Image (cartoon, grey):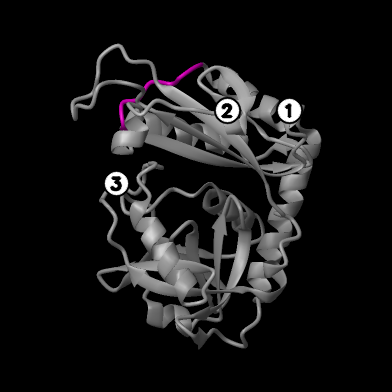
Amino acid sequence: MSRTVYVNGEYVREEDAKISIFDRGFIFGDGIYEVVPVINGKLVDQDYFLERLDRSLTELSIAWPCSRQEYLNVLKQLIRRNDLQEGIVYSQVTRGIADRDFIFPENTPPSFVAFTSVMELLDNPAAETGISVSSSEDIRWKRRDIKSVNLLAQCLAKQDAHSKGASEGWMVEDGFVTEGVSSSAYIVKDGKIITRPLSNLILPGIRRRTLFEIAERESIEVEQRLFTLEEAVNADEAFISSATTITLAVVCIDDQIIADGKPGEITLKLRELYKKRLVEEANSAD
């Protein structure tokens, strides 16, 4: 059965979905996107997602395409129309359709598209085994805090990781890990979680934010500082977080095994606590 997707005010079959060749997202990558997990047919982490979406739009001076509630209603309608129980909703807002010109067009309404994808989030088999990552140079622009649709550098890094048999890439700049290609990056040493502090050089991850809240509640120390690949290889644990992975242990970096090569205690604990939080949020959602 064909998926139903959303394109600028209309719900259409995916094979019938079209955007203009003059859409600035298509021509310039002039837009932002968000990915929201769906558990038991409900959006989760939605408050933090709306906050980050608003920030990205504001940083690029792109207007909301509708009210926040209307935006949420579109995503919820897609979940219902596609009978999505577990997976994600992807949504994208661009500056809109205008003749090609670098200057922002005036009086141009933003474009808004969205679609669902089925994914196994809670019982991901990789949670039991952990994943491997490979490192690559971080060649992205300097406003990585904006969730922009400009993802060519990430595509190159992800393809490089895939070609090396890794599931994810960790990007490195000036000798320090910035973040994963499509995730936040962490290591654990002596019971302490270590991750890079927020700045314009990394995306403010929603899962990162929630994991901090869980860690504080569980009295797990978090240190926000730069760390190197060498530190990561010699850590007790390493892991990633994202909308599609929740948390997953990293057990190998550039073919070097971390600790005993198995998901660590803190990583597994955080994942189970996060899963519980997501299920509770889904069950209490309207």
Q: Say which of 61 and 232 sits in front.
A: 61
Amino acid type indicated by mark 3: Arg
Residue 127: which disc? none
Q: Is residue 65 magenta?
A: yes
Q: Earlier in the sequence, mark 3 or mark 2?
A: 2
- In the rendered image, is residue 224 in sight? no
Q: Is residue 253 above or below residue 72?
A: below
Judged by depth in the image, the label closer to the viewer, 1 or 3, is 1
Work out which residue is located at the far top of the displayed protein and give it: 107
Q: Is residue 88 above or below residue 77?
A: below
Q: Is residue 150 above or below residue 57?
A: below
Q: Which residue is mark 1?
A: 81
Q: Which residue is mark 2?
A: 16
Instruction: Name the residue: 50% across, 72% down.
Output: 187
To which quarter of the image does residue 224 belong? bottom left
Q: Secondary structure at mark 3?
A: loop
Q: Secondary structure at mark 2?
A: helix
Task: List x then y, in percent, for residue 148.
Answer: 38, 41
Amino acid type indicated by mark 1: Arg
Q: Is residue 143 magenta?
A: no
Number of numbered discs overlaid on the protein picture: 3
Q: Which residue is mark 3?
A: 143
Judged by depth in the image, the label closer to the viewer, 3 or 2, is 2
* Category of crowding for the residue at label 2, using alpha-carbon neighbours closer than 10 angstroms: few (below 14), some (14–19), many (at least 20): few
Task: List x then y, in percent, for residue 196.
Answer: 40, 62
Task: List x then y, in percent, for residue 100.
Answer: 23, 27
Q: Secondary structure at mark 1?
A: helix
- Magenta-highlighted stretch: main secondary structure? loop
Q: Earlier in the sequence, mark 2 or mark 1?
A: 2
- The alpha-carbon separation of the residues under discs 1 and 3 comes to 36 Å
Q: Is residue 88 left or right of residue 50?
A: right
Q: Is residue 201 above or below residue 194?
A: above
